[in-house]
Amino acid sequence: MATLSLQHTLPKLPVPTLEETLAKYLHSIEPLATPEELERSKALAKDFLKPGGLGRTLQQRLLDVDRAAPYNWLDDTWWISKAYHEWREPLLVNSNWYILMRNDLNHPTEFHSTAENPAYTTWQVKRAAHVAQQLLDYAETLFSQSIPVEKTRAGPLCMHQYTQLLGFTRLPQHGCDRLVHVPFPNPAKHIVLIIEDQFFKIDVYSKSGNRLLDGDLERQFLNAITQLRTIHTAAPIGLLTCDHRDAWSVAREHLVVLDPKNRASLQVIEDALFCVTLDSSAEATKADRKEDFAEWAKFGMHGHGGHNRWCDKSMNLIFERDGKFVCHGEHSPCDALIPALIMDQIVRKPTEMNAPCTNAIVETPRHLEFVADSKTQEHIKAAEATIAALSKNSDCGIVYFDEYGSDYVKKVVKASPDAYMQMALQLAYFKQQGESCATYETGSTRQFRNGRTETIRTCSTDSLAFCKAMEDKAVSAQDKVKLMRKAMAAHSQYQREAANGQGCDRHLMGLRLCMQAGESHGLFQEPVFAKSAAFLLSTSGLFAGDNFVGTGFGAMYPDGYGINYLAGGKTLKFGVESKFDSKKTSTKAFGEILRQALRDMRSAVEKTLPESELKPVPKL
């Protein structure tokens, strides 16, 4: 069955009724609103819903948008621009995601410098070539539509996002960015190697049209490393991709006007299937679990001051001297789950120490030239200042919890691991802040054609009651667990509704976007409306992630947390990011509190179990 063979069978994303959406919204604000705010919001919702009211008009306009949309009223019309491309903040930290990969099964303990340049190691080059080769294998399988269609009990899932990853680049434009790519399947026959802020076009097919093997790519990478001695070093243009989007738009426009070589070089990067970076820092970052992998997580988030990156690229494979591997990507073409699933597959095959080689005739790696002037140097200097401020303020870490994992949650607690981990995050935040906050969890709508996400509003009256009970010593373990199960059930119900296109956030967004000049409604102007969408906890779960050390993305708000988590059978991992300049947050402190929350939940559950069910949980 071809990868895209069932796309035509998928339904369009539904437009919920006004009544369903307003009821869900009002229920979601209860734990966040004062009694007065809640009553005002209910009255405003009633006015919005009345016959002839603005809500009825907006709903009809949205239904017309849906009728005109070929596949998906949200994705076809607004999603990528409103959710991503109109946001002008730098991609670094704020939008891009990262994955820290586990070491290769053949990972050595000693690393030897290459003969071509002591700044690089032979293992680093070997692993980079091998992983790139595995991704190219996957690309060929995808382009031939041989990736199986993913299915759930509800039916097939949309596979469109798999076609939106390789060969995609976000192009900076004033006010709203664009994506540049060629139609699927991508015909590009090259990747780009980034070393010491220099860019090299690497052909991955021989002149006779055959794919290169690991050993051939090693040879290509080493050839580019050798060229570093003789090339005319270009300005570090990649730093500009880390800057504010409008600043990068101005800088890029200046570059393409300045000299035709600049557009030619930019187009090679933008058309490449993906980028590979070999980092030449004297020392690799520390992967110290006792320090929550903080140094390595920061490297995954923004590297060494943004060097050796092309933040606009949808997929970047980054390798340090000791062979540690980070995948870093731009978020807008597809949700991070898709590259995570791909990475989980391609890193399973170990790197061969004596890699196969075709010795085919292939184009020599071509150094991409950039012509820069004093204005470009000013742009680069400004970008460096932006990057320095962003990286200095980014408080990253990977919180490991190995006292139990999803196996325990399923077998002993008999609960959904995702709902359980969400309640742990709610409890940890409540412990630290003394209150709950608006919480975003990614809900997938891939059961619909071109479906992306819907917001799961985790914070509820039930989760707040659970948190209060857990912190009250007077409440019995039985009552604590009862409230925990009620909160998890409410979360799971919202998760199912969101997956069915029946959340409230996307619908409310569509209604607001249908308003015309001069139109407004008090419902959207109430302070609690903004508060309920100011997600101080921005969260997203992936899967077990046994091949990952951790994953992460940035917090949405200065006083919030960005949390990406992995529910492993024996270990739970949380990639956490906050801001150092916030007086309310601390990644290290939150990690410790989160561990205690998980212990407290387990303790409460076990106090309610018969002794026959209490078994020691082995650690890793």
Image (cartoon, rainbow, N blue to C red):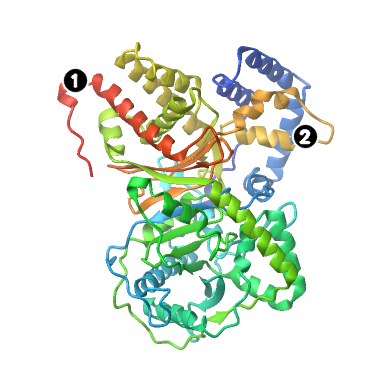
Q: Secondary structure at mark 1?
A: loop
What residue lies at 28% left-to-right and 63% top-to-bottom? 105
Badge 2 vs badge 1, beta-carbon distance below 8 Å: no
Answer with left or right where residue 35 lies relative to residue 577: right
Q: Could you tell me which quadrant the N terminus lies in?
A: bottom left
Residue of label 2: 515
As drawn, the label of residue 610 is 1
**Pick the front one: 276 or 392:** 392
Residue 200 versus residue 458 in the image, above or below: below
**Pick the front one: 607 or 140:** 607
Answer with left or right where residue 213 lies relative to residue 189: left
Residue 114 versus residue 337 in the image, above or below: below
The amino acid beneath tag 1 is Pro
As drawn, the label of residue 513 is none
Mark 2 vs mark 1: in front: 1
Spatial separation of the CA atoms under disc 2 and disc 1: 58 Å
What residue lies at 38% left-to-right and 84% top-to-bottom? 358
Q: Whole-percent x and y of residue 110? A: 28, 69
What residue lies at 35% left-to-right and 34% top-to-bottom? 595
The amino acid beneath tag 2 is Met
**Pick the front one: 75 or 96:** 96
- The answer to whether residue 508 is seen in the rendering is yes
Q: Quadrant of residue 60?
A: top right
Question: What residue occupies the far right of the structure in this picture?
Answer: 518
Answer with left or right where residue 514 lies relative to residue 502: right
